Image: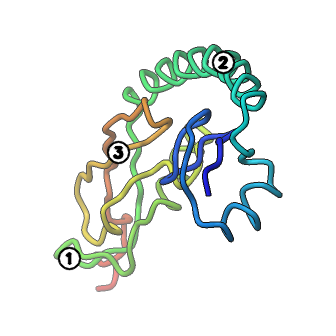
């Protein structure tokens, strides 16, 4: 089934593209949700007009996100966690913990933007990507340090 996308959908296509999907997916999800329309000359013209407006809005959004990216590059986040003497954590640091650290710095980002390969399980400096937009990604660092007194005060 060929459909014209009204909105960009991850792993399927961008707005205005004609995609070939299974009939059930098109009839039961894309069409009822208003994410796609049938391919007709009228719909193609309509989507082309919408796309022009959205491209202009997206250019502005990308410019704003690049400014935010420059601010985020200057941020230094430190997360204190319980760890043993060798630096192994009694748990792990996840994207949720990093989001909380950035929120404390005044940046309200979504948890899915923090692209960690795996949860952090040792103290030290960790590098990861923050994906603000498909066109705006930056590399960030977080310092994972042991809480003061987590093992030393147990004497």
Q: Earlier in the sequence, mark 2 or mark 3?
A: 2
- The answer to whether marks 3 and 1 mark residues whose Cβ atoms lie closer than 8 Å is no
Report the coloring of the rendering.
rainbow
- Name the residue nearer the viewer: 106 or 80: 106
Mark whose residue sits in front, 3 or 1: 3
Q: Is residue 136 left or right of residue 144?
A: right
Which residue is located at x 37 percent, y 29 percent?
A: 73
Which residue lies at the image location 26% right of the left edge and 48% below the top edge?
127
Question: Image point 53% across, 24% down: which residue?
Answer: 65
Left of 91 or right of it: where is 60? right
Image location (x, y in percent) of residue 61: 60, 21
| 115 to the left or right of 19 | left
Circles 2 and 3, Cβ within 8 Å, touching? The answer is no
Helix, strand or loop for disc 3: strand
- Crowding at mark 2 (Cα within 10 Å: few <14, some 14-19, many 20+): few
Q: Tell me the quarter of the image containing the C terminus.
A: bottom left
Residue matched to label 3: 129
- Which of disc 2 and disc 1 is earlier in sequence? 2
* Residue underneath mark 1: 85
Q: Nearer the viewer, residue 78 or 51?
A: 51
Q: Which residue is mark 2?
A: 57
Give the Cα distance between marks 1 and 2: 52 Å
Marks 3/1: CA–CA distance: 29 Å
Kindly identify the residue that appears in the image at 40 percent across and 66 percent down.
Answer: 93
Q: Nearer the viewer, residue 13 or 142?
A: 13
Q: Earlier in the sequence, mark 3 or mark 1?
A: 1
Element carrying mark 1: loop
Question: How far apart are the two marked residues, 2 and 3, measured between alpha carbons?
Answer: 25 Å
Instruction: For mark 2, give the secondary structure.
Output: helix
Position of residue 79 measured from the top left corner of the image (x, y, whole percent): 41, 56
């Amino acid at each position: 089934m060929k459909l014209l996308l009204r909105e960009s959908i991850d792993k399927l296509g961008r707005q205005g593209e004609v995609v070939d999907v299974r009939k059930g997916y098109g009839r039961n999800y894309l069409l009822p949700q208003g994410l796609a329309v049938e391919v007709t000359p009228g719909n193609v013209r309509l989507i082309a007009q919408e796309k022009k407006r959205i491209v202009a809005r997206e250019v502005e959004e990308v410019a704003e996100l690049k400014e935010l990216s420059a601010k985020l590059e200057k941020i230094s986040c430190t997360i204190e966690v319980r760890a043993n003497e060798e630096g192994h954590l009694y748990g792990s640091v996840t994207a949720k913990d990093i989001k909380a650290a950035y929120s404390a710095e005044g940046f309200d980002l979504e948890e899915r933007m923090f692209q960690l390969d795996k949860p952090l399980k040792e103290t030290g400096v960790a590098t990861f990507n923050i994906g603000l937009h498909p066109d705006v990604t930056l590399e960030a660092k977080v310092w994972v340090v042991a809480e003061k007194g987590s093992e030393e005060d147990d004497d």
